[in-house]
Image (tube, rainbow, N blue to C red):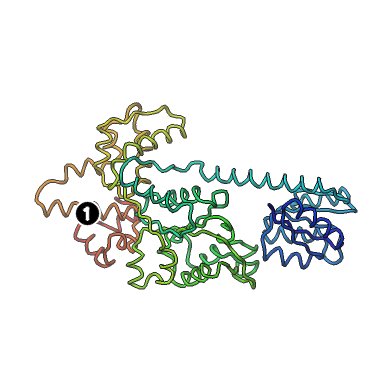
């Protein structure tokens, strides 16, 4: 069933068209003037729009142009009893999907709607395929991930809000996509936003959208992520990094089920399943005042914790095999055998970057190996692994100091030497981290300048 919007200044035509669509099982909304139709079409969502061309006041082509500028996505079919070639060409250029001449036959109308719905279904399938291209499937064989996947299967088909927890690189977005694909919303959009990657002054516009001219640089109307995800799933990654002021606005949207664009004057209903993820301890953030408690209870309905790679090493052989086949296929390389010694060496590494880092290392290994991947290739790809084996000797104090130095360096490098982020990840005060670096001989200034 489709929800069809009909615009025509002839009430008899409206009644006839609406009756034909309703008898065929569709829902029909009618309007007898373009100006009022423009208001209704911005406030609601429809699957197909049929509009007459010649009407008093605003005509159908002007309405079509306004709908295009406002970003209304529903396909528009123009109808007219005074059609010309020029009129049809202009309608097509403005984005009309079809142009029908009056008088209209019921069969032609229903066939047009069926074709439009079929095309929309194909586009949704293509969108899902595009989302999957180049993305990693969840690969696992051990007990830790078996428990995670059992939880995924249990909650995927529900509307429950899920908080996906885990270190950077553990695959939180991949799990979110899997939850979406196994849900009843699978044929609808999956929209993502990394809260940590968007400047605080832009995050409201990204989430809720803005009207043209709402602020300097807003040259066009913009639909936010909530609107883009309507009827589908919205995934907010690193929600723990969302500014407090924005958290209050997000809470209002979740409570009301509607958004208001920046500079807008109307509420836009949204039907969205929200999934969030973070590498931070949300409960601790709440205690320290960094995350709103009321929002926490809205998004933390079902926590789903992903283990770091070091705690699921029984999955490492399967992951290495998967990534090596994937990388080889993408680059047109012949498949490479990974020797048991290489797998054993990989298992000795700490994997601070988790599965994401493993994928990069596998690609590096294939580049360094002409034939089978052996332990020597692993030591070339991960030089710190070889140096660690030699360096971890001497007294306990010397070993602890070496371990601390390596841990801090790995975290600094993974976070681009951002001291605040590194200190937070290591659970240290920023001043304490600076003192540790001085004690351990880590030259921050030289390293930032690329000197080592």
Residue 19 position (above or below residue 283):
above
Residue 262 position (above or below residue 447):
below
In the picture, measured across the screen, residue 213 lies left or right of residue 304, that is: right
Q: Residue at x 51, y 65 (%)?
A: 203
Residue 56 image position (x, y, % from top left): 87, 65
Q: Residue at x 46, y 30 (%)?
A: 332
Residue 363 image position (x, y, % from top left): 38, 37
Residue 228 position (above or below residue 181):
below
For label 1, the residue is 405
In the picture, measured across the screen, residue 66 lies left or right of residue 269, that is: right
Secondary structure type for disc 1: helix
Residue 286 position (above or below residue 127):
below
- Residue situated in front as seen by the camera: 375 or 12: 12
Q: Residues within 10 Å of mark 1 (few under 14, many from 20)?
A: some
- Residue situated in front as seen by the camera: 274 or 428: 274
Q: Residue at x 43, y 61 (%)?
A: 196
- Residue situated in front as seen by the camera: 432 or 172: 172
């Amino acid at each position: 069933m489709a929800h069809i919007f009909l615009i025509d200044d002839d009430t008899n035509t409206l009644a006839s068209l609406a009756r034909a669509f309703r008898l065929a099982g569709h829902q029909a909304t009618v309007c007898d003037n373009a100006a009022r139709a423009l208001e209704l079409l911005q406030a609601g969502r429809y699957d197909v729009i049929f509009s007459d061309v010649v009407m008093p006041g605003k005509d159908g082509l002007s309405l079509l142009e306004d709908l295009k500028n406002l970003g209304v996505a529903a396909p528009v079919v123009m109808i007219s009893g005074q059609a010309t070639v020029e009129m049809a060409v202009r309608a097509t250029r403005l984005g009309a999907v079809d142009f029908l001449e009056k008088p209209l036959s019921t069969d032609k109308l229903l066939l047009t709607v069926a074709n439009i719905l079929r095309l929309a279904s194909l586009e949704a399938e293509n969108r899902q395929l595009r989302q999957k291209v180049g993305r990693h499937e969840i690969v696992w064989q051990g007990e830790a991930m078996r428990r995670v996947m059992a939880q995924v299967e249990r909650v995927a088909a529900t509307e429950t809000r899920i908080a996906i927890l885990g270190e950077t690189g553990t695959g939180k977005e991949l799990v979110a996509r899997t939850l979406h694909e196994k849900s009843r919303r699978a044929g609808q959009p999956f929209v993502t936003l990394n809260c940590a990657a968007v400047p605080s002054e832009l995050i409201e516009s990204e989430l809720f959208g803005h009207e043209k001219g709402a602020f300097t640089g807003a040259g066009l109307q913009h639909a936010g992520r909530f609107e883009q995800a309507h009827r589908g799933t919205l995934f907010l990654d690193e929600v723990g990094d969302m500014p407090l002021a924005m958290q209050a606005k997000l809470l209002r949207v979740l409570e009301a089920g509607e958004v208001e664009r920046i500079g807008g004057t109307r509420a836009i209903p949204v039907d969205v399943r929200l999934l969030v993820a973070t590498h931070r301890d949300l409960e601790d953030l709440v205690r320290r005042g960094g995350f709103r408690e009321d929002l926490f209870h809205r998004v933390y309905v079902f926590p789903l914790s992903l283990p770091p790679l070091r705690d699921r090493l029984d999955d490492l052989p399967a992951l290495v095999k998967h990534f090596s086949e994937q990388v080889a296929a993408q680059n047109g390389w012949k498949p490479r055998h990974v020797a048991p010694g290489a797998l054993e060496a990989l298992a000795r590494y700490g994997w601070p970057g988790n599965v994401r880092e493993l994928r990069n290392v596998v690609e590096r290994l294939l580049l360094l190996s002409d034939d089978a991947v052996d332990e020597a290739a692993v030591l070339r790809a991960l030089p710190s692994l070889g140096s660690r084996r030699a360096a971890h000797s001497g007294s306990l104090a010397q070993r602890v100091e070496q371990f601390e130095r390596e841990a801090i360096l790995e975290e600094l490098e993974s976070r681009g030497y951002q001291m605040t982020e590194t200190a937070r990840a290591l659970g240290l005060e920023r001043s304490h981290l600076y003192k540790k670096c001085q004690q351990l001989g880590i030259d921050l200034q030289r390293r930032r300048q690329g000197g080592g």
